[in-house]
Image (cartoon, helix red, strand yellow):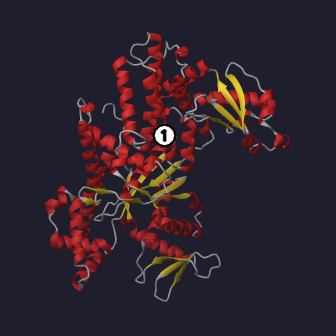
C-alpha cells in the first residue's frame, strides 16, 4: 500500500529517535485529510497517541517541537513541521506521485485492502442476516434499509478476505399463514399467484384481514394453521407454493438491487427446533411458568423477575424469539462462524439484547460474538402511487424519475441503454442518501434531494465516474510505464494524490464500526477533487508527457472511486 511504505519509512526514523519498535508507531501516523486551504502535509504523528500506546514513562513529557528538531528530512520526507500535538511530514512530491499511481495500478480492486493496517486483523467467518421480509406483508422501507446495509457489510467483509454467509431469514410462518390459507381459498387466483406472487398474496391478505374479526374466519384460520403445524400434506403444499413463488420473485428483485443470498432461511425451519430449545431451557432450570401459563426466562440481575423474556405461549407453542434462539444455535452447528451480525431497525434492539442474554444463560459463550447492527427509521418515502408497499415500487419509481431527469438534460442522448443506466444511477442516489449519516439516525427521505446531479449525491458520484471513463476512452488508456511524475506537481494534482493516500485508513474505520458513512464522505470528496482537477488540468491540448501523466492520475481516481462504489453496493456506470 502506498501509504504503508511512507508510514513505515516515517516510523523507522521515529523508532531510532524514540527507541520504540516501529510497529508500535505505525498506528499513530495517519494521512492528513485534504484541506481547501491548500498546502497541508501528507502525514501526521499524534503525540498523544504515541504516549498512550507506549509503556515507557520517559515519553510522558514528549513535546512535538522537541521531537521535530531531532528528526531529519531524507529521500522520502521533504519537510517536517509541527502543529498542536502533532509532527507533520510532507513526502517528496515526485515520490508521492510515483508511489501512489504505481500502487493503485498494481493493486487494482485490492487497493487499500492490502494495507498493513489490516495485517493484524484475523480472517474470520461471518454470518450476516439481513433483509428478511415477511411473506404476504409489505416490504416496507425498513426492509430496504436492512437489505442495502447488510449488503454493504457483507461486501466489505468479503473484500477484506473474510468468509461471508449471507442469510435472508423470511417471515414465512405464524398465524398470518392461517389467514392467508383461508383467504386464498376465497379470493385467490392461481394465474395471478404465478405471475405476481408478492402482490397477489398481499391483496389476498388485505381482503381476508377485513373479515378477520369474524368468528368463523378466525376459526378457519386457526384450523388451517394447526394443520400446517401438524404437517398436513395438502396444507403444506399450499404453503410451500406461497413460499417458493415468493422467493423466486424476491430473487428477481434482489438481482435488480445487485444483492444475492447464500441461504433463504425462515421461521418455518425452526418450528421443531424451537420446541427443543424450550426443552433445553426447562432442563437448565431457566424456563419459568407465569400465572397465565406462559413460559418466561428471568433476565433480571437480582433474579426477581423484574425483566423477563416470554419464550412460550400458554398453549406450549413457540414465539419469534424462541425460533431465533433455535436459528442461532443451528447456524453455529452448521457454519461454525466467528461472528454473526443481525441487520434490523433499532426498534428491535431490545429483542436482540434478550436473545443474546438468553443464549449466554444457556451456556453459549459465543453469544458475545453476536452483534446487532441497528439503523434508524426513514420518514416520507412515498411513490407517486402513494405509500411504499413493494420494493419493486421503489425501484421502478427511482428508475422512472431518473430517466425523466436524464431525458430533460442535454447530454443524455447517446446512452446505449438509458433504462439500465437510469436504474443504476437511481440506485446510487438511494444508497448515498441512506448512507451519508450514522446508520442509527432517522432521516427524512426526499426524492428531489436524492436525485440532484450536483452536490453530495449518488448521481454526482456516477456522473464523475462516467466522465472520467469517457476521458480515458477519448484519449486512449493511460500507460504507467512511461509517466513523467514531474508533470503532476500542480496543487490540484497533489490534492487528488493526497486523498488517494488516505483510502486504506477510511476502509479500516468502516471495517471497525461497520458504518458506510466514512467511505461515502471519502468518495464524495474524491469526486469533488477530481472534478476540480478535470477543469484545471486538461488532457486535451497538453504536451504528450503532461497528457499521459494526467491521464494516469484520472485513471487512478476513477479506479478507487469504482472500488468504493462497489463496496457500497453501487454499480458504476460508464456513460450517462
Q: Nearer the viewer, residue 170 or 461?
A: 461
Q: Is residue 537 above or below residue 132?
A: above
| Residue at image point 14% right, 65% down | 189
The quarter of the picture where the N terminus appears is top right
Q: Is residue 16 above or below residue 60?
A: above
Determine whether the residue tagged by mark 1 lies in a helix, strand or loop: helix
Q: Is residue 16 above or below residue 57?
A: above
The quarter of the picture where the C terminus appears is top left
| Location of residue 544 in the rendering, given as x and y in whole percent from the top left corner | 44, 10
Q: Nearer the viewer, residue 138 or 339?
A: 138
| Residue at image point 43% right, 42% down | 456
Q: Is residue 103 above or below residue 366?
A: above
| Residue at image point 51% right, 27% down | 104
Q: Is residue 258 visible?
A: no
Q: Is residue 152 visible?
A: yes
| Residue at image point 50% right, 86% down | 290
Count of marks, rendered view: 1
Question: Mark 1 — residue?
Answer: 159
Q: Residues within 10 Å of mark 1 (few under 14, many from 20)?
A: some
Q: Nearer the viewer, residue 63 or 96?
A: 63
- The extreme right residue here reads 58
| Location of residue 73 in the rendering, given as x and y in whole percent from the top left corner | 73, 22
Q: Is residue 535 left or right of residue 42?
A: left
| Location of residue 493 in the rendering, given as x and y in whole percent from the top left corner | 52, 24
Amino acid at each position: 500500500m502506498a501509504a504503508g511504505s511512507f508510514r513505515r519509512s516515517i516510523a523507522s526514523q521515529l523508532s531510532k529517535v524514540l527507541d520504540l519498535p516501529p510497529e508500535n508507531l505505525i498506528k499513530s501516523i495517519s494521512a492528513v485529510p485534504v484541506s481547501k486551504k491548500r498546502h497541508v502535509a501528507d502525514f501526521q504523528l499524534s503525540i498523544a497517541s504515541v504516549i498512550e500506546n507506549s509503556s515507557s514513562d520517559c515519553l510522558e513529557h514528549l513535546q512535538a517541537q522537541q521531537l521535530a528538531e531531532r528528526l531529519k528530512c531524507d529521500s522520502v520526507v521533504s519537510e517536517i513541521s509541527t502543529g498542536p500535538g502533532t509532527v507533520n511530514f510532507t513526502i517528496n512530491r515526485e515520490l508521492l506521485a510515483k508511489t501512489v499511481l504505481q500502487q493503485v495500478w498494481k493493486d487494482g480492486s485490492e487497493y487499500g485492502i492490502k494495507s498493513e493496517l489490516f495485517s493484524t486483523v484475523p480472517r474470520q467467518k461471518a454470518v450476516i442476516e439481513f433483509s428478511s421480509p415477511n411473506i404476504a406483508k409489505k416490504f416496507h422501507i425498513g426492509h430496504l434499509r436492512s437489505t442495502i446495509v447488510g449488503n454493504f457489510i457483507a461486501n466489505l467483509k468479503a473484500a477484506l478476505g473474510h468468509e461471508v454467509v449471507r442469510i435472508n431469514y423470511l417471515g414465512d410462518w405464524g398465524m398470518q399463514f392461517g389467514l392467508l390459507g383461508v383467504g386464498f381459498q376465497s379470493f385467490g387466483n392461481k394465474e395471478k399467484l404465478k405471475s405476481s406472487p408478492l402482490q397477489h398474496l398481499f391483496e389476498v391478505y388485505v381482503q381476508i384481514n377485513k373479515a378477520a374479526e369474524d368468528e368463523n374466519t378466525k376459526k378457519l384460520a386457526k384450523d388451517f394453521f394447526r394443520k400446517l403445524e401438524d404437517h398436513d400434506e395438502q396444507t403444506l403444499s399450499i404453503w410451500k407454493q406461497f413460499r417458493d413463488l415468493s422467493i423466486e420473485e424476491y430473487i428477481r428483485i434482489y438481482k435488480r438491487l445487485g444483492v444475492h443470498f447464500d441461504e433463504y432461511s425462515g421461521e418455518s425451519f425452526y418450528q421443531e427446533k424451537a420446541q427443543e430449545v424450550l426443552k433445553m431451557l426447562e432442563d437448565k432450570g431457566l424456563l419459568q411458568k407465569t400465572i397465565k401459563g406462559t413460559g418466561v426466562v428471568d433476565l433480571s440481575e437480582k433474579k426477581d423477575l423484574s425483566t423477563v423474556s416470554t419464550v412460550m405461549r400458554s398453549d406450549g407453542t413457540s414465539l419469534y424469539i424462541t425460533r431465533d434462539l433455535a436459528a442461532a444455535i443451528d447456524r453455529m452447528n452448521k457454519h461454525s462462524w466467528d461472528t454473526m451480525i443481525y441487520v434490523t431497525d433499532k426498534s428491535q434492539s431490545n429483542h436482540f439484547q434478550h436473545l443474546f442474554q438468553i443464549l449466554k444463560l444457556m451456556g453459549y459463550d459465543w453469544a458475545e460474538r453476536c452483534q446487532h447492527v441497528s439503523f434508524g427509521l426513514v420518514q416520507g418515502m412515498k411513490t407517486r402511487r402513494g405509500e411504499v408497499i413493494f420494493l419493486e415500487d421503489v425501484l421502478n419509481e427511482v428508475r422512472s424519475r431518473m430517466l425523466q431527469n436524464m431525458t430533460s438534460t442535454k447530454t443524455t442522448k447517446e446512452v446505449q441503454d438509458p433504462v439500465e443506466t437510469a436504474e443504476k444511477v437511481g440506485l446510487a442516489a438511494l444508497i448515498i442518501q441512506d448512507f451519508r449519516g450514522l446508520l442509527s439516525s432517522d432521516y427524512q427521505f426526499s426524492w428531489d434531494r436524492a436525485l440532484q446531479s450536483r452536490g453530495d449525491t449518488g448521481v454526482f458520484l456516477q456522473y464523475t465516474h462516467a466522465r472520467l471513463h469517457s476521458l480515458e476512452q477519448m484519449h486512449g488508456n493511460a500507460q504507467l510505464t512511461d509517466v513523467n511524475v514531474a508533470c503532476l506537481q500542480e496543487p490540484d494534482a497533489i490534492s487528488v494524490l493526497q486523498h488517494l493516500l488516505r483510502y486504506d485508513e477510511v476502509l479500516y474505520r468502516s471495517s471497525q464500526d461497520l458504518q458506510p458513512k466514512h467511505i461515502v464522505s471519502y468518495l464524495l470528496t474524491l469526486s469533488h477533487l477530481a472534478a476540480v482537477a478535470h477543469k484545471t488540468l486538461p488532457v486535451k491540448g497538453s504536451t504528450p508527457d503532461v497528457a499521459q501523466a494526467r491521464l494516469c492520475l484520472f485513471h487512478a481516481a476513477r479506479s478507487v472511486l469504482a472500488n468504493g462504489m462497489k463496496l457500497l453496493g453501487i454499480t458504476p456506470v460508464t456513460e450517462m
